[in-house]
Amino acid sequence: MRYHGAMNPARRLSIVFALLLFALPGRGHAYIDPGAGSYLVQIVIAALVGSGFALKLYWKRIRDALHRPKSRDHDAG
């Protein structure tokens, strides 16, 4: 009985090629509204503020994880 879980290389390559074909579009002719730039600025600011808040919220855990004291078992020997 043949194991059906593995995919043959030719089929895998054709699936990757098809995904790349849809993921990499050709030329796009579209109008970008001035409000879109403002929206992108808002996204960047929100990401910075959110990451700053998360850093402030978890700072003690991050600091403790980075500065763990060395084990005393190694120093006793």
Image: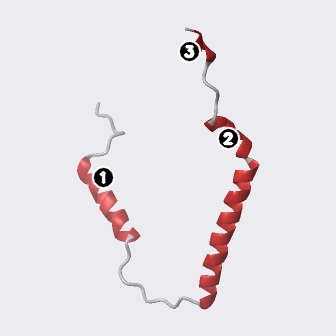
Residue marked by disc 2: 63
Q: Which mark is residue 45?
A: none
Q: Which mark is residue 12?
A: 1
Inter-mark Cα distance, 3 to 1: 50 Å
- Amino acid tagged 3: His
Question: What residue appears at the point 54 percent right and 88 percent down from the top-left corner?
Answer: 32
- Amino acid tagged 2: Arg
Toward the left, the furthest residue is: 10
Question: What residue appears at the point 33 percent right and 64 percent down from the top-left corner?
Answer: 18
Task: Pinpoint residue 57: horizontal percent, then vertical percent.
Answer: 76, 50
Which numbered disc, 3 or 2, marks the residue that appears first in the sequence?
A: 2
Which numbered disc, 1 or 2, marks the residue that appears first in the sequence?
A: 1
Residue marked by disc 3: 74
Q: Is residue 76 found left or right of 46 in the rendered image?
A: left
User: How is the rendered protein coloured?
Assistant: secondary structure
Task: Pinpoint residue 64: horizontal percent, then vertical percent.
Answer: 68, 36
Question: What residue appears at the point 32 percent right and 34 percent down from the top-left corner?
Answer: 3
